Image (tube, grey):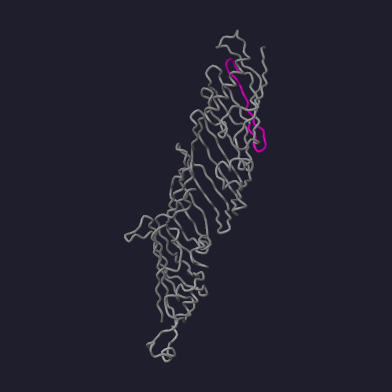
Amino acid sequence: MWRSVVNLRFEQLPLAEGRGVSQKGDVRRFTTVLLLVLLATISRGFALAAWPSAEGEIVGELKLFDRSPEFLLPWKLAFKKGETGEQAFIYKIAASGTQLMAGGRINLLTGEGTWRIEEARVDAAVWLALIAPQLSPALASATAQGTLTLSGEGTLRQGQAVGRLTVEWRDGVLTHATQGWTLEGIAFEGEFAIDIAASRLVSTAPFELTVRTVTHPRFGARSVFIQAFLNEQRSLFVTAARVEIAGGEMVSDPCEVQLFPVSVDMNLHIDRVGLQDIVLLVPAAGLAEARGRIDGVVRLKWSAATDFQLGVGSLSLHNDEPTVVRLSPALGLLTGHVPERFDLLPAWLGPLARWIRPVNPAYADMKAIELGKADLRVKTLDVKLTPEGDERGRSATVRLVAQPEQAGGAVKEVTFDVNVAGPLNAVLKLGMKQNFSLETH
């Protein structure tokens, strides 16, 4: 029986650096090399229709990114005899963080055949370190744990792979020590249709991403759930998303997430979210402490270029428990607008006018409030967000009506009205210039 063994090593496989083997031109060049090797081993005396199968192997190294020259994936392509005109093959990658074995058959006359991934495991730690700098400089210090497994099968059309690919990740962890956040209990499962020749990768069914807990210096969250499709436009269509945060829940309406570059535009429904965590998230809100819960709907946008932006929305109190706030110290916030003593006599009376100056009974209470020494029980809180401007050109309005918790004081009620004309970054800032009113006994 005729038999030919070919052993070749490519020190630098001519693949497009920075894109990997999934690009159309790369696979065609690789297929061309393979076919040329096969043709060189076949006797000229055979007719094309009677090509025999060959046996042998090709080995090489796959370099993925130009900025990571030390990360090379050694691969081996072994081919064995098949039926007349058919070639069996096994493709293997064995490297730190990557184990892959795939096999199949291809008809040498037509380029048609089949392929199947027999085993594939990817170490998340190794690959995040490789890919993160390519995605965003901010992710360069992030680390990961866990193993991704891949499976799939399909057909070969003129030497190009078409079929399905399943990706799973269980008990994953993502950590960014510098920024102080961690995602634990990550699970991902998705199935995708692939077409190498068309550079196509789309979801065949909604994939699911869950995160058990999220820790952050300013907040905590749990039970993150995202269900989405990867579509033809290489963006994500999110069909469902929710997270438990601050004792409540946030749920997103269906939305589209652009991936290149990443940008998010979603409508969030807020249900019983704790004010205490909102205060931590917005340190410039003018509140030192808050207890209670809020409901509402807010549009939220994010991109690397613009950061977070608030859209149209409204927030109000959830009335199933008391809402209490304490202001951050701001001397003059209230007392700067009222006298400490009342001038009852004209100044021209001299000492007599100075002697008969009764103390404003509300002044001490107001000072305690503005210095953050008195709790305020909130009666109503209404926030309206109108980024394009309302009938008065305001991008946001906030009204907070509260009364001191301590009974018997001179101040019966305090009302803060905040009107924002411009960027919504200041929507929750209770600064020195907002209008207020006092009602005293």
Snapshot quadrant of residue 123:
top right
Does residue 106 show up magenta in the picture? no
383 lies left or right of 34: left
Predominant secondary structure, magenta span: strand
Toward which corner of the image does residue 10 lie, by quadrant?
Answer: top right
- Determine the residue positioned at 52% across, 56% down: 244
| Residue at the outermost bottom position | 352
Query: How far across and down, in percent of the image, does residue 158 sit?
Result: 52, 22
Q: Nearer the viewer, residue 228 or 14?
A: 14
| Farthest-out residue, top | 45
If the image is split into quadrants, where does the C terminus sit?
bottom left
- The correct choice, above or below, for 271 with respect to 138 in the image is below
Magenta extent: 82-100
Q: Along the horizontal axis of the image, is 368 left or right of 80?
A: left
Measured as percent of width and height from the top left, residue 219 is found at: 55, 58
- As drawn, the residue found furthest toward the left would be 391
Q: Position of residue 11 (x, y in %)?
A: 65, 27
Q: Residue at x 47, y 38 (%)?
A: 234
Above or below, 15 against 394 in this view is above
